[in-house]
Amino acid sequence: MKKFVSIFAVTAVLATFGTTPAFAQTASSKFAAEVSDITLIPNSSSSAPPITVLSTMIKTPNKKDLLIGVSLETALFTQTQVKSKGGTPDSASASATLEVSVLLDGKAFNPKDSSGAFPPKVVYDKRAQTLSATLGGFQSCVDSNGDGVIDVTTECTLTEEEIELILDTMAAHHFNFMAKNLDPGTHTLEVKVGIGVDTSFGAGSASATAGVGRGSLTVEEVRAINQVVPGAGIEFDFLQ
């Protein structure tokens, strides 16, 4: 379905499909977009290389810049369980990460000439969860009354039990990417999402999943002023 308002064109994708990317089939001289009302990546418990989830095209004249907005619903699940007795420590950890990048004409950002969409990669969601416990601890027991029965409450010196939960989270559900000084012609923008999950545990268990729900990709043609002083125009700050 295509709607044209003046010189703007927006493509909305409403069909249901699995992880198959949808490609906008139209180009615009000012603005282009793809909006998804589907689950782009079902929750996965395995790490996966970057997958194309959204794509659109835009036609630009010479030396134009692009403002590229990517919004995503993200889902992370982390589960940790520990089992401990007799004062034996146990721990379990689970982590899940969603990283997003934008390819311009099939290419990643090139730091040598600052071509492509910047930043090269953005963490949209990241969580690291660690649970540790030391339970049922005791130091020593003495049958002080000589009745042959150890009373744990009165004849044992107990150590303190410990339970610790650590969560470390980072999230960015919308981010503006930039591309500058494009050559004239039709350009393709692709949103790539990479999933990373990791678990470790002892006597207990741990699991982690990550996925992406709805999303939108918007691309707007802009023209920034030529940079003459720091802070004017478009600047890319990165380690070279």
Image: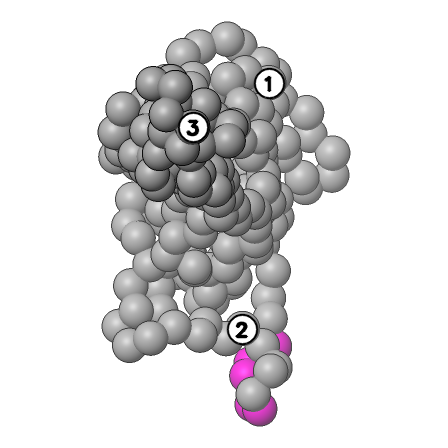
- Mark toward the start of the polypeptide (2 vs 3): 3
Q: 44 and 198: which one is in front?
A: 198
Q: Residue type at mark 2: give it.
A: Ile
Q: In which quadrant will I find the C terminus? A: bottom left
- 238 vs 12: above or below: below
Secondary element at tag 1? loop
Residue 197 visible somewhere in the drawing: no
Instruction: Give the CA distance from mark 3 to mark 1.
Output: 73 Å
Q: Quadrant of residue 54?
A: top left
Q: Residue at 54%, 16% (x, y): give it.
A: 38
Secondary element at tag 3? loop
Q: Residue type at mark 3: give it.
A: Asn
Q: Can you identify the residue that label 3 sits on?
A: 145
**Residue range corresponding to the magenta coloring:** 225-229
In the rendered structure, are the residues bearing label 2 and label 3 in contact, judged by CB atoms less than 8 Å apart?
A: no
Could you classify mark 3 by the number of other residues whose Cα lies within 10 Å: few (under 14), some (14-19), or many (20 or more)? few
In the rendered structure, are the residues bearing label 3 and label 1 in contact, judged by CB atoms less than 8 Å apart?
A: no
Q: Can you identify the residue that label 1 sits on?
A: 37
Instruction: Give the CA distance from mark 2 to mark 1.
Output: 33 Å
Q: Quadrant of residue 238?
A: bottom left
- Count of numbered tags: 3
The label nearer to you, 3 versus 1, is: 3
Q: Residue at 55%, 83% (x, y): give it.
A: 227
Instruction: Give the CA distance from mark 2 to mark 3.
Output: 82 Å
